[in-house]
Image (cartoon, rainbow, N blue to C red):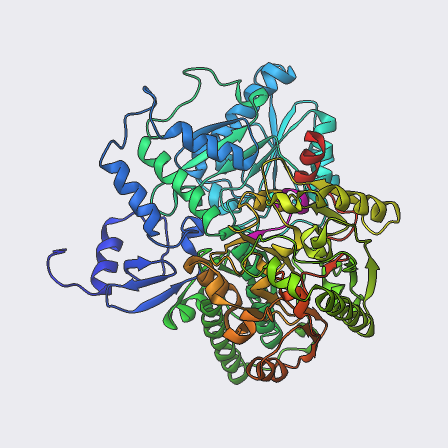
Amino acid sequence: MDTKKRANSQDFVRAEGGFCAKNYHPLPVVVERARDCLVWDVDGREYLDMMSAYSAVSHGHLHPRLVAAAQRQLDKVAVTSRAYYSTTLGPFLEKLCTRAGFERALPMNTGAEAVETAIKCARRWGYRVKGLPDECAEILVARQNFHGRTTTAISASSEPDYRAGFGPFTPGFRYFDFGDMASVRAATTSETCAVLVEPIQGEAGIVLPPEGFFRELRDWCSEQHILLILDEVQSGLGRTGRWFAFEHEGIRPDGLILGKALGGGLLPVSAFLADAAVMDVFTPGSHGSTFGGNALAAAVGLEALRVMEDENLVARSAALGEYLLKRLRAVQAAGQPLIRAVRGRGLWVGVEVDPAQASARDLVERLARRGVLSKETHETVIRFAPPLTITRALIDQAVEAFEAVVLEKQAELAVNSVAAPAVLATPAAPVALRRRAPTAAAKLDESAPHLLMSPPDFFEVAYTINPWMNPEQWALDAKQLSQDAHAGWAALKATYEALGAKVVVKPAARGWPDLVFTANCAVVLDGKAILARYLNAERAGEQAHGERMFEQLRARGEIDWLHRTPEGVYFEGAGDAIYDAGRRLMWMGYGQRSCRSAHHTIEQVFGIPTLSLELVDPRFYHLDTCFCLLSGGEVIYHPGAFSEQGRAQIQALVGAQLIEAPAEDAEHLGVNSVCVGRDVVMCHCSPALRQQLEARGYRIHVVPLGAFNRSGGAAYCLTLKLNNLYRGRGAVVEGERRWAEAA
């Protein structure tokens, strides 16, 4: 075809169909350009991308930082092969290994190549380290797996369509049933060298394993001296609301396969990661790739990792994934018996369609006509896996279009067929998916808050470490202000107790006036406490007092674990770390009192996605001074306290639940408030803010705390919640194990 002439979609479809091999069955959409979560076809029609190229476009289409990184490198050198060193590969692999927790990485291009690399590594390890006889090493693989379409990958597949007509197949694979440890044990022989498995089976229909399966598999592999290799080509790099899907189970594999999102949606970049004891079976000449690890790919891969960190894409995936699941399950409830199940993690969700009612392909094509792009798998499951940069508003747009498609199809079924028997109204459970019992976090609203407070016995403004503090003004009326502080603190404690909270009192100590602000001394989740490390010398002495207090709380069973913030990392507790049970993440403020690197401490200890927000106004030096989370998921915030990027991220996750605090409230520290159920305890509430909160069903309790305002604090600063639950008390995550070992 003559591309110089204006052509329409059908012209391009005919051209591609006439010359391209028939190994794909695309939707009839001809994409001409794309940006972030949106694509436009050659006819100018706009679509919302809810598939992101099977997770390869997790950063959004043509992310400006990634395009810039590619352009900078293209101006220097792109490909030289691994015959020489480069200036980009070392920094890229150092960043990747540090983030994933492995000592070595072998760079490749496609996910299938990285899988082949892992298989070669496992076999050679079996012979040279485990001591298996030559030519007999076996690798266990799950039925319904997908590890690519190379000859070796399909030899490991149980899917007839992938294998038909492509034999003879590579030997050395034995099958087990995904999620079934009895099947794993039965498949294991004396010649087993490795287990190769996806943490979530993507092509099989976003199939999740039973709770605890991977912990048991990890233990089994360790006992049997077998490598556990996880294929996270699709699930890795934030897709499931963790950097890596294995983090959901609190384990660490022996080998990790990554790809797709590693190339930032611009280039094919993949890697196999392992520690030296495994990876060093490779020697020069034993494996390679002309393009693997090229300078251009490494430059883009490094920037892709940096963007994922800087833009909190992992935490966004966790929070917005919860929202997407909730919205799609509502469609499921309205769409029975057509919709049989909704399952997933993070921004990776599968919607299972009853094949007796409709094909997934039919619904996907209807969805495309409504401006939303997705893709079916196995004719029964529709995938929703948008770029991690998606917003709550765009999720609403996509789900509303899908709901319209489902209702449209239901209406047709009602007209053209006899109503389905009532028994079909119950969603069918997928074979490898077990419904989980409600987590402790889901029950959080049913439990009374357990709060820590410290009386203002020695409170005063004795130094200046924020713009609110003025010792000279305090001294002018110190006696009255001290009385006001005691009265306000007592009224606050009484208000909490009247709302059903249990209050534990932490003794005051002479010489440390800011001990009263208990939110700063630690953050507690699942019975684990991360103790503060103060930036200002004036407060540094509080650390030892706080540690003694928490040791006492541990002795009484109030908490289970204490974790000290690392040297050189400043972190001021719950003042800069606010747990969001509904979105299942931790909001963190940095830039004034806490370091950005405290983000990693929180993720390691609690195993929770953490979204970091830069604070740019010295008056709002802690996150709690400008960000208040309510029980219904609403957020009161002061936009001027945050960077432009921070404001955009809050807006993307919170959407219509965001409440902008009037300037009057922000300047009187009214945002520094505590929500107990539907009750909001505040030091100040303007009529405008009160009207908004009451319209949303909240009751307002104003407690005068003017004396504490002079130090930059209010209700939230004076309070530390001890019984926040995420995984539940007793849960141990892999990061915490490594943390404890290092300590």
> What span is colored magenta in the figure?
603-611
Image quarter for residue 672? bottom right
- Residue 118 lies, in percent from the top left, at 52, 29
Q: Nearer the viewer, residue 492 or 168?
A: 492
- Residue 591 lies, in percent from the top left, at 51, 50
Q: Looking at the picture, does residue 182 appear above or below residue 127?
A: below
Task: Say which quadrant the C terminus sits in.
Answer: top right
Residue visible at 36% across and 40% down?
Answer: 300
Q: Nearer the viewer, residue 356 or 653?
A: 653
- Residue 226 lies, in percent from the top left, at 66, 27
Q: Does 15 appear in magenta?
A: no
Residue visible at 32% across and 68% down?
Answer: 46
Image quarter for residue 366? bottom left
Q: Nearer the viewer, residue 344 or 409?
A: 344
Task: Say which quadrant the N terminus sits in.
Answer: bottom left
User: Left or right: 469 with respect to 249?
Assistant: left
